[in-house]
């Protein structure tokens, strides 16, 4: 969530996507109207409505509902650009921006990820009803509309796009949830598999959680000031999670922060905030968009698509996954990320599909044959289309951890060969494994793709790799980790990383100068799992010291080709700091635990016949 | 040594900024000098190839300034001239020195057999008893007798291996030799220079150097040896995969004689003792100027310890020491403003050249000026970024102060009171602690001031630090590590690093930008909280009682490991902290200790074992660091 804010406020590529037109273009082609639209409970939501000056035809609405401000405020101040892309702005829609309930200039109280109500009474509200009431008002009050509505939004606004879907107003014809925040305990933003994303949350909530006495055009700064030049050091010295509420930090001034810390299991609070359970009987066409390098809501995109697909099987539902960081598809150009060079502007294709989607369902001005899934395959840097997602032709193939750092697989996915023994390391909360090398103040989103050699050199990171591949291997679909471990402690984190080891210099990756590209360990996917949740998200259970347990978890979908001559590598570690908060490695309630609860633990990863630790790769046939 | 060779050979191209001045100098030199090439006969009949640049001026007599080198007096051919103009050596030509470079016995175009760091023979009896001192004597003797218009005064200087030959020149006793400057002199390859530090093998420097330098030269040649072909440019990977160091020997077989010899002398035996240049430093006649770099990765030990040997063994000698904040040879470069990310506030190299070296030779060889009032020691203090001068080293107003390692990572003057306490880590030869952070191949010179935060983050590195200093805190002298340790096995290395922790809000002035870890990255390195390596040193545990007779550790037994980390000249500014890091590998800079008491040079890969190392900090077994504090 955090990054999209930065992107809106600061990012140069956002400026690019304004197509150098700016407010003057908007002003000369659109009229702006501000309205406080009344909801069924009497609360009014601030709404900015931009209507085309050209009245020669009726237009559909295209709306974003946001907690990040619909400004600039005032009927003489115009946005620099309108809609999800410049092409759609030129195409002419009635663009609507609304401050969601309780944010900026809208009345009411804000609630984190507003829980959806399945059955509404007259006065009960949620995001679906607020969207309904808004649309109802727009259809009646804005002239020259064609009676159809579309919604889009990235990140938190992506959630509001998703939240419009259950019991959707019949005028809603097309919705594009993009990197939608979907379930913040299982995989988005706040937690991944129950592990708290400390670095992102601490920074995001400091700004987002500022109180508002009444509707405001600007929130006053942040809850606290922290000048963090070395995040690793800062969070290590900060100590247990409860110290974030010290007077110099949140000081219990963050409502959401205290909610996060107050709900350390998948309890009713989090379950009510899982929008997936409500994505049933969905009528509008849906285009879900997500990024393979999205550090915040990749989970949300994939799982929103999946939830609609399985729970609303007849829905006209589509997925686009590209090589994007959080929201990068909104920019005009996206051809590189860190050392990766995609060899094309991947946003060209994306913007074409997005425009067709809205034009078709809202204006009938474009043909409607959309592939089910349009997916960018990393490694080969190619767009692929699939009639189902994940593709039916992908088969899960176990890659088995072996002694002496081997990683073996049987072609065709036959049963694994037996292996022997275990490897162990000491996971020390006083010296956790950094999530990236170097010294950084904020979260560097390149951690998701960069060289892992710094980690391989550590004694608390286990490394397993195949021989160089004699032919290319494409994986497309769900990735799963299945690890047998024991610990001397009563809780542990497990971080499994899938890595593509380069045999040498190659096109598409500019490895750092003066550094040998041979052996470069390109991170392809990594995910954390908090082991206490291995049996249940709701009821955590301790590890029994010395007892082997199986920890099996999803690492989301992937689409990547390991080229001939490359090696497939898996790294296993028990911290990823300070991206993820430290697991005390004792079974305690982490948000309230003390310094003394943090203990070194010896962790064993087994690879014997009875305990074949593996990673399951979806190999495309 | 290797780095210097490279910089001498290749530096000219990188100094384009000086081209205008230098092209004028170049024309002047061509007009005012001529070059001859001369085979100078030694007492045993062997002839040494010598390049001599002589002023055309005959109105006065000229002094001779010589460097003897194993790195070639190239370019060869009397019409091909050495590029004196790239650096400060051009000032010697402006002063009319006869500039001489000589290929040492057995290298390049000289006849005879090369012997690495050829032992000094103090009892030369016949004309076949030759060593580097006698070769220098014979060369000087020939030159003062044969070179036209020489004034009968000779100086010798040289950096690195040529620094060793300068030391040997000083031992020649030739009466015409008036001034000698050994600079970063190779002095003791077992104790602290190049190949070993306290008996631990500096495999990366050694191998990078000798895989090429050590190749045989069957007959005089102007063509140098080729380098080794590596399959990866990731040194951590190459050395880890190559494994036990006997596997490196296999790569050359018998072809590199000295490499093979090294393996036969794992301890400081008579062979190594004969190769300690300090044994030649008695009754030294010429004025001596020893020069070195506090951040010299190769021969920092040689500079400090050669000087100390001269002071103690030859007290009547007119001897001086200059130590600047320099990498190997940086004092002869055009830029002494920084190393890696750390700034020194001024061009320390220019200051040295103009205020120390030129006046030194000008006085002793030309009689120019008054006797330079060189104090005994001229030392640059990093941190404070200032030169200080002393009449002795360590300074008279230095007091030793003991700081104790504390539970929880503290460092303080109070001895620990707990009855039993220690910190422990597992040292795993399969995951040794890198000596620097980035993937790279050739040993960087910047590692000597690199940020150690990457190491602090590891579970196999112990970190202890003082509170913030409330006033400047200056170290001037030898830092001693005095550790109480126990091992789960029978041997271990101990690397002790002295670190200056910068305040979190620290930054240099915006204009003072250095390269980031030696790479040409445009962004500035984050200096807030920087953990600047001031000096690190390794001790191979088996030598804790004797370098001649190694002793195994008894597993579980608490033992004392005490060693001199280095001489340090550094000011921890107010608001900074002093940090000590302790670890048991420093890879691939230093070969891995198998952590088993076996002959490391013949050890198998299977001998390398994980072990648990405890460093004690309790009342019975206080581990401490003894700091030379300047009052």
Image: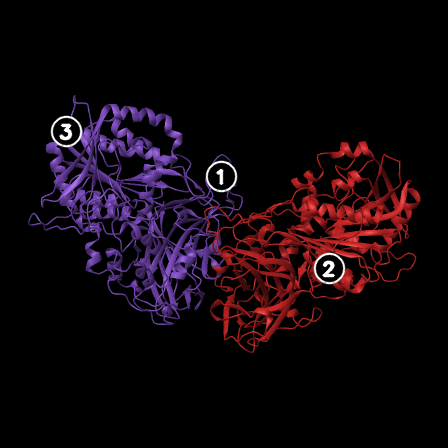
Chain colours: A red, B purple
Residue B219 placed where, x, y %? Answer: 19, 47
Mark 3 neighbour density, 10 Å: few (under 14) some (14–19) many (20 or more): some
Res. A173 in view: yes
> Is disc 1 in the same subunit as disc 2?
no
Residue holding disc 1 = B508
Which is more N-terminal, label 3 or label 1? 3
Mark 2 neighbour density, 10 Å: few (under 14) some (14–19) many (20 or more): few
Tell us which disc is closer to us: 1 or 2: 2
Indicate the secondary structure of the residue bearing disc 2: loop
Mark 1 neighbour density, 10 Å: few (under 14) some (14–19) many (20 or more): some
Residue holding disc 2 = A387
Residue placed furthest toward the bottom: A610
Task: Kindly identify which chain the residue marked by label 1 belongs to.
Answer: B
Residue placed furthest toward the left: B126
Task: Kindly identify which chain the residue marked by label 2 belongs to.
Answer: A
Image-based side of B333 in relation to A419, left or right = left
Rounded to the nearest angstrom, the CA distance separating label 1 from label 3 is 49 Å
Answer with the quarter of the image where residue B564 lies. bottom left
Residue A518 placed where, x, y %? Answer: 47, 54
Task: Kindly identify which chain the residue marked by label 3 belongs to.
Answer: B
Residue holding disc 3 = B151
The answer to which of A464 and B373 lies nearer the viewer is A464
Where B195 sits versus B87, above or below?
below
Rounded to the nearest angstrom, the CA distance separating label 1 from label 2 is 58 Å
Tell us which disc is closer to us: 2 or 3: 2
């Amino acid at each position: 969530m955090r990054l999209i804010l930065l992107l809106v406020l600061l990012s140069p590529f956002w400026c690019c996507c304004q197509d150098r037109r700016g407010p003057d273009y908007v002003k000369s082609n659109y009229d702006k109207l501000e309205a406080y639209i009344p909801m069924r409970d009497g609360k009014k939501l601030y709404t900015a409505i931009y209507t085309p000056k050209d009245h020669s035809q009726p237009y559909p609405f295209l709306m974003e509902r946001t907690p990040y401000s619909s400004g600039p405020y005032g009927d003489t101040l115009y946005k620099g650009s309108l809609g999800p892309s410049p092409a759609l702005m030129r195409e002419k829609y009635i663009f609507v921006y609304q401050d969601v309930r309780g944010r900026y200039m809208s009345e009411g109280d804000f609630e984190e990820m507003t829980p959806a109500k399945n059955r509404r009474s007259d006065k009960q509200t949620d995001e679906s009803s607020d969207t309904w009431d808004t649309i109802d008002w727009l259809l009646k009050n804005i002239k020259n509309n064609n009676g159809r509505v579309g919604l889009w939004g990235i990140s938190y606004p992506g959630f509001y796009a998703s939240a419009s879907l259950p019991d959707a107003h019949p005028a809603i014809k097309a919705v594009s949830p993009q990197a939608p925040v979907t379930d913040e305990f299982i995989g988005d933003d706040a937690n991944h598999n129950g592990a708290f994303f400390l670095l992102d949350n601490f920074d995001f909530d400091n700004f987002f959680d500022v109180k508002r006495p009444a509707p405001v055009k600007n929130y006053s700064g942040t809850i606290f000031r922290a000048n963090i030049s070395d995040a690793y050091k800062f969070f290590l010295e900060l100590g247990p999670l409860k110290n974030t509420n010290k007077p110099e930090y949140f000081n219990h001034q963050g409502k959401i922060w205290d909610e996060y810390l107050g709900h350390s299991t998948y309890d009713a609070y989090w379950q009510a905030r899982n929008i997936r359970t409500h994505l049933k009987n969905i009528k509008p066409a849906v285009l879900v968009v997500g990024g393979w390098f999205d550090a915040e809501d990749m989970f949300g995109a994939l799982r929103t698509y999946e939830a609609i697909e399985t729970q609303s099987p007849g829905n006209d539902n589509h997925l686009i996954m590209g090589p994007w960081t959080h929201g990068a598809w909104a920019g005009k150009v996206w051809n590189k990320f860190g050392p990766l060079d995609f060899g094309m502007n991947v946003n060209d294709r994306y913007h074409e599909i997005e425009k067709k989607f809205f034009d078709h369902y809202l204006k009938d001005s474009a043909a409607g044959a959309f592939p089910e899934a349009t997916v960018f395959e990393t490694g080969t840097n190619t767009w692929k289309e699939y009639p189902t997602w994940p593709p039916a032709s992908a088969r899960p193939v176990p890659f088995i951890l072996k002694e002496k750092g081997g990683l073996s697989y049987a072609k065709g996915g036959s049963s694994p060969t037996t292996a022997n023994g275990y490897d162990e390391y000491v996971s020390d909360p006083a010296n956790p494994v950094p999530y990236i090398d170097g010294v950084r103040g904020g979260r560097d989103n390149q951690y998701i793709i960069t060289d892992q050699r710094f980690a391989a050199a550590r004694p608390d990171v286990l490394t397993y790799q195949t021989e160089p591949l004699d032919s290319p291997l494409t994986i497309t679909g769900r990735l799963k980790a299945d690890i047998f471990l024991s610990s001397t402690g009563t809780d542990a984190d497990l971080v499994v990383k899938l890595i593509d080891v380069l045999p040498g210099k190659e096109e598409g990756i500019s490895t750092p100068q003066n550094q040998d590209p041979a052996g470069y360990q390109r991170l392809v996917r990594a995910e954390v799992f908090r082991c206490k949740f291995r049996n249940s998200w709701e009821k955590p259970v301790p590890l029994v010291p010395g007892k082997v347990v199986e920890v099996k978890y999803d690492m989301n979908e992937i689409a990547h080709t390991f080229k001939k001559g490359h090696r497939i590598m898996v790294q296993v570690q028990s911290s990823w700091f300070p991206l993820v908060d430290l697991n005390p490695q004792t079974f305690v309630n982490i948000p309230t635990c003390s310094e003394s609860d943090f203990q070194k633990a010896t962790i064993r990863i087994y690879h014997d016949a009875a305990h074949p630790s593996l990673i399951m790769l979806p190999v495309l046939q | 040594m290797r780095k210097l060779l490279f910089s001498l050979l290749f530096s000219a191209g990188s100094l384009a900024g000086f081209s205008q001045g230098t092209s004028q100098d170049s024309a002047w030199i061509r007009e005012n000098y001529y070059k001859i090439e001369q085979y100078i006969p030694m007492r045993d009949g062997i002839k040494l190839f010598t390049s001599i640049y002589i002023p055309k001026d005959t109105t006065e007599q000229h002094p001779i300034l010589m460097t003897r080198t194993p790195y070639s007096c190239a370019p060869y051919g009397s019409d091909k001239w050495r590029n004196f103009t790239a650096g400060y050596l051009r000032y010697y030509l402006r002063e009319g020195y006869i500039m001489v470079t000589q290929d040492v016995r057995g290298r390049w175009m000289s006849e005879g057999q090369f012997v690495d760091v050829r032992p000094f023979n103090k009892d030369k009896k016949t004309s076949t008893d030759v060593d580097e001192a006698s070769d220098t004597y014979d060369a000087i003797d020939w030159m003062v007798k044969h070179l036209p218009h020489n004034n009968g005064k000779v100086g010798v200087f040289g950096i690195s291996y040529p620094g060793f030959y300068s030391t040997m020149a000083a031992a020649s006793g030739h009466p015409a030799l008036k001034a000698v400057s050994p600079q970063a002199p190779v002095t003791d390859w077992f104790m602290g220079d190049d190949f070993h530090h306290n008996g631990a093998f500096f495999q990366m420097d050694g191998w990078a150097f000798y895989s090429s330098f050590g190749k045989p030269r069957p007959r005089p040649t102007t063509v140098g040896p080729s380098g080794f072909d590596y399959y990866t440019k990731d040194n951590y990977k190459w050395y880890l995969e190559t494994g036990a160091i006997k596997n490196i020997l296999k790569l050359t077989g018998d072809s590199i004689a000295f490499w093979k010899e090294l393996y036969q002398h794992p301890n400081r035996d008579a062979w190594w003792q004969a190769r300690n240049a300090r044994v030649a430093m008695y009754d030294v006649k010429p004025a001596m100027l020893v020069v070195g770099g506090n951040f010299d990765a190769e021969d920092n030990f040689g500079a400090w310890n050669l000087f100390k040997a001269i002071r103690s063994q030859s007290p009547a000698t007119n001897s001086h020491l200059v130590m600047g904040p320099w990498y190997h040879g940086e004092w002869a470069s055009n830029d002494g403003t920084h190393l890696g990310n750390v700034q020194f506030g001024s061009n320390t190299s220019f200051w040295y050249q103009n205020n120390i070296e030129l006046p030194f030779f000008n006085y002793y060889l030309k009689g120019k000026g008054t006797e330079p009032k060189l104090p005994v020691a001229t030392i640059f203090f990093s941190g404070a970024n200032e030169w200080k001068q002393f009449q002795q080293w360590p300074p008279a107003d230095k007091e030793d102060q003991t700081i104790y390692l504390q539970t929880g990572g503290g460092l303080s003057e109070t001895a620990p009171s707990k009855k039993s306490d220690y910190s422990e880590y597992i040292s795993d030869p399969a995951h040794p602690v890198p000596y620097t952070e980035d993937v790279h191949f050739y040993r960087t010179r910047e590692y000597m001031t690199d940020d150690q935060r990457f190491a602090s983050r590891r579970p196999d590195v112990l970190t202890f630090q003082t509170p913030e200093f409330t006033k400047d805190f200056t170290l001037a002298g030898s830092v001693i590590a005095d550790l109480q340790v126990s091992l789960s096995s029978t041997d271990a290395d101990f690397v002790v690093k002295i670190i200056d922790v910068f305040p979190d809000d620290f930054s240099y002035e915006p204009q003072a930008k250095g390269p980031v870890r030696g790479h040409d990255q445009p962004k500035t390195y984050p200096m807030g909280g920087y953990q600047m390596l001031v000096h690190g040193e390794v001790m191979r545990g088996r030598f804790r009682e004797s370098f001649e007779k190694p002793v195994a550790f008894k597993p579980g037994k608490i033992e004392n490991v005490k060693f001199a980390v280095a001489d340090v000249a550094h000011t921890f500014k107010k608001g900074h902290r002093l940090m000590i890091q302790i670890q048991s590998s420093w890879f691939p800079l230093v070969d891995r200790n198998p952590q088993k008491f076996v002959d490391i040079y013949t050890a198998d890969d299977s001998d390398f074992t994980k072990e648990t190392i405890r460093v004690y900090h309790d009342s019975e077994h206080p581990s401490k660091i003894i700091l030379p504090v300047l009052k």
